[in-house]
Image (cartoon, rainbow, N blue to C red):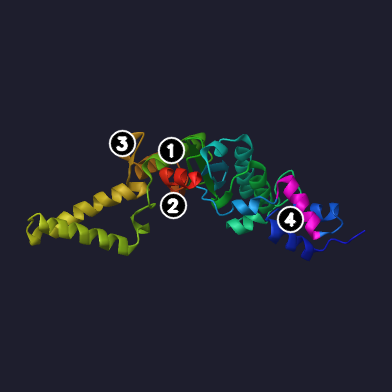
């Protein structure tokens, strides 16, 4: 019996783009014959994954889950919305989020090396397997894992995976009202899209740039220079109210700031609650989607 080495598996994987376990099986089935193994994978449809890797994958789904003090969020991309709604794709995304929740994983490469539930493959190889099976390019784009330690993490997913949010509280309370507020604030984050937690988190260069824009606009509108600084002070506070979560008007009760809502619940429960962090993933943000020229495509096909 031919011994299948790691080098042989690696070589076949480079040639086909198929998963490690699939490559090992192909070599075993073909007694180590590389060419026959390639054909074996092609017949199974598994070598097609590499050819799909260059396609733009800007659709997909975001999953966000939480269990007590730990939360996980991940964005998995596919090429079309049709595939994103596929049960197999949705199951893959859900399983990957569970893997993140159960492991202290910091980045996508570390995630790919972890075992995928119910198979002998790791997450990376399962991704390759899914690409070959579903027939579209897919990618694990980004992830985050939040561990509040002494606290609570809430999760919310909007629009069947279009937006996912995690919200972290530091507190010693486990009251159900905290979980309820966590979901409400996560919904707020999904809708209001804050850029920062509070004004201390806003980079100094961002603040200075905003102030300079405000100054130029005030002077160009004819405002006297001696009152421009007062105008800027009022406008920069408004800016903080737009971009900082704790200073935003709560979408459920616009008369209250988010920070004040959290503070009020702490007083009600007789404890201190700190909204410590949030994570917001919006599907496809920052990905340049290819815009096909339909007329040019038809002309090309007619040649």
Task: Give the CA separation, mark 4 to mark 2.
Answer: 30 Å
Circles 2 and 3: CB distance less than 8 Å?
no
Pick whichever of labels 1 and 2 is earlier in the sequence.
Answer: 1
Residue 51 visible in rendering: yes
Q: Name the element at disc 3.
A: strand
Cα gap from disc 2 to disc 3, whole angstroms: 34 Å
Q: Position of residue 180 (x, y in %)?
A: 48, 35
- The answer for how far apart the CA atoms under marks 1 and 4 are is 40 Å
Residue 35 in magenta stretch = yes
The residue depicted at 11 percent of the width and 59 percent of the height is: 219
Residue 104 visible? The answer is no
Q: Position of residue 214 (x, y in %)?
A: 19, 57
Tell me the number on the disc at residue 156.
none
First in sequence: mark 3 vs mark 1: 1
Q: Which residue is mark 1?
A: 187
Instruction: Answer with mark 1 or mark 4, whichever residue precedes in sequence.
Output: 4
Secondary structure beneath dot 4 equals helix
Tell me which numbered mark, 2 or 3, is placed earlier along the sequence: 3
- Which range is magenta? 34-46
Numbered tag placed on residue 288 in the rendering: 2
For residue 254, which numbered disc appears in the image? 3
């Amino acid at each position: 019996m031919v011994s299948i080495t790691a080098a042989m598996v690696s070589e076949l994987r480079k040639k086909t783009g198929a998963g490690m376990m699939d490559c090992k099986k192909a070599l075993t089935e073909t007694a180590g014959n590389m060419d026959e193994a390639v054909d074996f994978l092609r017949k199974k449809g598994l070598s097609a994954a590499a050819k799909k890797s260059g396609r733009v994958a800007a659709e997909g789904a975001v999953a966000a889950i939480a269990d007590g003090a730990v939360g996980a969020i991940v964005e998995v991309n596919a090429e079309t919305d049709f595939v994103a709604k596929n049960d197999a794709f949705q199951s893959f995304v859900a399983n990957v989020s569970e893997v993140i929740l159960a492991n202290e994983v910091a980045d996508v490469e570390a995630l790919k090396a972890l075992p995928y539930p119910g198979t002998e493959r790791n997450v990376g190889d399962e991704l390759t397997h899914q690409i070959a099976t579903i027939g579209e390019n897919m990618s694990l784009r980004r992830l985050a894992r939040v561990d509040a330690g002494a606290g609570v993490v809430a999760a919310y997913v909007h629009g069947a995976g279009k937006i996912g949010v995690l919200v972290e509280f530091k507190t010693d309370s486990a009251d159900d009202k905290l979980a309820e507020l966590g979901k409400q604030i996560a919904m707020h984050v999904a809708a209001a899209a804050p850029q920062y937690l509070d004004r201390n988190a806003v980079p100094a260069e961002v603040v200075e740039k905003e102030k300079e824009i405000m100054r130029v606009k005030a002077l160009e509108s004819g405002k006297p220079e001696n009152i421009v600084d007062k105008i800027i002070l009022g406008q920069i506070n408004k800016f903080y109210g737009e971009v900082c979560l704790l200073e935003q008007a709560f979408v459920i009760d616009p008369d209250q700031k988010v920070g004040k809502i959290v503070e009020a619940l702490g007083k009600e429960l007789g404890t201190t609650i700190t909204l410590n962090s949030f994570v917001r993933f919006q599907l496809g943000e920052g990905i340049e989607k290819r815009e096909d020229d339909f007329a040019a495509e038809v002309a090309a096909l007619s040649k």
